[in-house]
Amino acid sequence: MKKETRLADFVMGGLFMALAVVWFVQANQMMKVERGIGPGEYPKIIAIGLFIVGFLQIAMNISGIKGLRGLKIKVVDWKGLRRLAVYVAVTFVYVRLMNYLGFILLTPLYIFFACWFFGYRKHIINIIVSITTTAVIHLVFRVIFMVVLPEFRLF
């Protein structure tokens, strides 16, 4: 690890671990189902993985923490930070609208936005990928795992 990034890696590892704990607690409060995997099981697995990654990031940087006194911190990349904030906000809106607009209607729009946001500008391909990905996810989770996905219920 570079000396310039050790502090940032240490802090981000701690933030990942904290986020994982919050995420795990929130997933425990999700609806329980009688058969199959409930909607909270997958977020729990992701939270555990995020916690492990955060722990590993901290563990890899522990040996370098002693020499951080003379560390020069690089300037913040504000453009990248703004892009991250936009994507996090869109993801937050996606999650909040899921209970009203449903998985099948909202997910292709979200995937299309993600493709566009990350620079892929072939819109026909984006539409095909968005619809196909949504259909496959729906098939796997609804039919194979028997997970109840949110449905449209605006009216």
Image: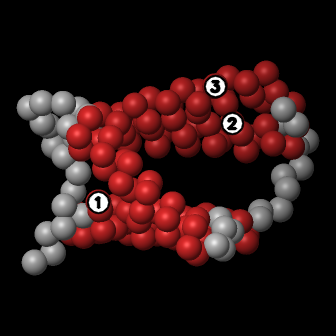
Judged left or right of residue 12, residue 72 is right
Label 3: how many Cα within 10 Å (few below 14, some 14–19, many 20+): some
Q: Residue 61: where, in percent of width, then height?
A: 75, 28
Q: Amino acid at mark 3?
A: Leu
Residue type (three-letter) at the residue carrying disc 2: Phe
Quick one: label 2 or label 1, which is nearer the N terminus? 2
- Distance from label 1 to label 3 (Cα)? 34 Å
Identify which residue, 104 or 85, lies in the foreground. 104
Position of the N terminus, as image quadrant, is top right
13 displayed left or right of 98: right
Task: Tell me, for residue 10, which label it has, or none.
Answer: 2
Query: Where is the C terminus found, in terms of image quarters?
Result: bottom left
- Residue at image mark 1: 103
Residue denoted by label 3: 56
- Is residue 91 among what the camera can see? no
Inspect this view and state whether residue 94 appears: yes
Q: Secondary structure at mark 1?
A: helix
Residue closer to the observer: 65 or 104: 104
Q: Residue at point 14% right, 37% down?
A: 32
Q: Secondary structure at mark 2?
A: helix
Which numbered disc covers residue 111? Answer: none
Q: Residue at x 24, y 44 (%)?
A: 142
Rounded to the nearest whole Å, what is the CA distance between mark 3 and mark 2?
10 Å
100 up-or-down from 31: above or below: below
Residue 81 coordinates in the image, percent (x, y): 67, 65
